[in-house]
Image (cartoon, rainbow, N blue to C red):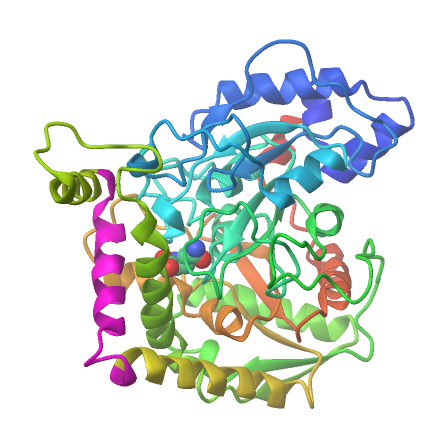
Amino acid sequence: MSDTLSLTAATAAARIRAGELDPAELWHGYRERAAADEHNAFVWVAPDGDAPAVDRDAPLAGVPVAVKDLFCTEGVPSQAGSRILEGYRPPYTATSVARLTGAGAPLLAKTNQDEFAMGSSTEHSAFGPTRNPWDIARVPGGSSGGSAAAVAAGSAPWAIGTDTGGSIRQPAALCGIVGLKPTYGAVSRYGMIAFASSLDQAGPLTRDVTDAALLFGAMAGQDPCDSTSIGLPAPVELPSRMDLRGVRIGVPDELTGEGIEPGVLASFERTLELVKELGATVEPVRLPHAPHALSAYYLIAPAEASSNLARYDGVRYGYRADGVRDLLEMYTKTRAEGFGAEVKRRIMLGTYALSSGYYDAYYGRAQKVRTLISGDFNAAWERFDFVATPTAPTVAFELGAKLEDPLAMYLNDFLAVPMSLAGIPGISIPSGLSEGLPVGFQLAGPAFSENALLDAAYALERAIDFRDAPWRKLA
Ligand code: GLN
């Protein structure tokens, strides 16, 4: 059994299709591992019982998938890591989840996350923190930390998460797996419990790049239920590229210097050498406004969040405070008791930034910076195919290390946020270790360059040949 659990999802799917692997055996193996998980990666695991019926000829061939808590799933708890959605069972399923189950991947579990996806460590969850399978004293990153920990530990074959300002790429980096944030609009947001609607984007967290392409291909596409979904110009292809000949990679000074741990930078530099050996050119590129991305992000994302979270009033969903005398007290007490400290901080920041006297000074200005950041990337694409940076400035840090210092927590995302503001795709792949912990290498490309991005990441993944991940030790 453990041999089976150490297969990548694409290999397991191929074996099921060939009649060499029983999908029911795979299901029970993962279900039991997920139920016994010691990292607090899951907030709900499918109940024991008969394995779901699967279609071996479907694209995902019965390989089960774990899904971040914030994806609405009919009849299944969907709380976005928040107490305020306690007891909520959505009457419908998110498009991306419906597409995965429709493509033959049964729902294995819901994964832990920072409350409403606000955070970089999965410590801001009403369900308690998730632990990093590499070292349980450390965080898995966030906000999709449950999905990343589950995949790294081998208690799920693959998972999906969301990335608003790094929440797929950064936990993938800190857990030594692959995470893809697609182009904004490539995947439907319908049924995702919203954080910041102009940034939220769903994507895969997987053991390798091939799995990422397979899972992404099954979830992407235009959706009439989300008017901002545009689908992809071409179907997602499985990556096959063996080298990087002719590929031009830009390395921005602004995102490869100050604030990055020496061990992370050393791994990044080593990976750039491999990139060159594979035939790519590597040259400096300027992204002059990128250093301002984090400031702009922490105005835009909280502004959108303060509006999106206004709906949690104790009337319509989930938790309602007791012992209240009137309607206003029901609203205020429900919100005071239902939201955690980080969510309240964002609501206050966002409400302030949008208030009439400050709108132009904060929110309006942040939107201008966002446009400048997109412009920087557009200029870069005239000379380069991709931009490369480390994914996160540090390796996984200890639980509690940044919990009392919100700004230190926010800084985790300064390499991921520029791509989010520009709406462009970024992928993180493991590039090696620093002090025994995984380091992520990020490649970002123009909007809708996913096929090329996955292909380049695949060639690089083969050259890096990262073999240390905990899930490999299941064999
Ligand atoms: N860590 C960032 C934040 O807290 C990004 C979160 C995300 O991408 N969901 O906003």
- Residue 390 rendering spot, x and y as whole percentages: 52, 67
**In-front residue for pair 393/57:** 57
Q: Quadrant of ligand 1?
A: bottom left
Quadrant assignment, res 16: top right
Question: The N terminus is located in which quarter?
Answer: top right
How many marks are shown on the rendered structure?
A: 0
Residue located 45% across and 44% down the image? 145
Taking 117 as reference, is 198 left or right?
Answer: right
| Residue furthest to the top | 49
Image coords of residue 244 (percent x, y): 79, 71
Magenta extent: 338-361
Above or below, 295 against 467 in this view is: below
Q: Can you name the residue that lies furthest to the front here?
A: 326
Give residue 248's position: percent from left, percent from top.
Answer: 72, 81
**Nearest the eye: 167 or 393:** 167
Residue 357 in magenta stretch: yes
The quarter of the displayed image where residue 102 is located: top right
Q: Main secondary structure of the magenta part?
A: helix
Above or below: residue 132 compared with residue 169: above
Say whether residue 64 is left or right of residue 152: right
- Res 261 visible: yes
- Residue 256 position within the rendered picture, expressed as x and y whole percent measured from the top left: 48, 76
> Would residue 411 be visible to someone looking at this image?
no
Position of residue 262 relative to residue 313, above or below, is below
Residue that sits furthest to the left in the current view: 325
Q: Which quarter of the figure is the C terminus placed in?
A: top right
Q: In the image, what residue occupies the spot 27% across and 62% down?
A: 408
Q: Quadrant of residue 325?
A: top left
The one of 435 and 295 positioned closer to us in this rendering: 295
Q: Is residue 16 above or below residue 453?
A: above
Left or right of 201 in this view: 18:
right
Q: Is residue 234 magenta?
A: no
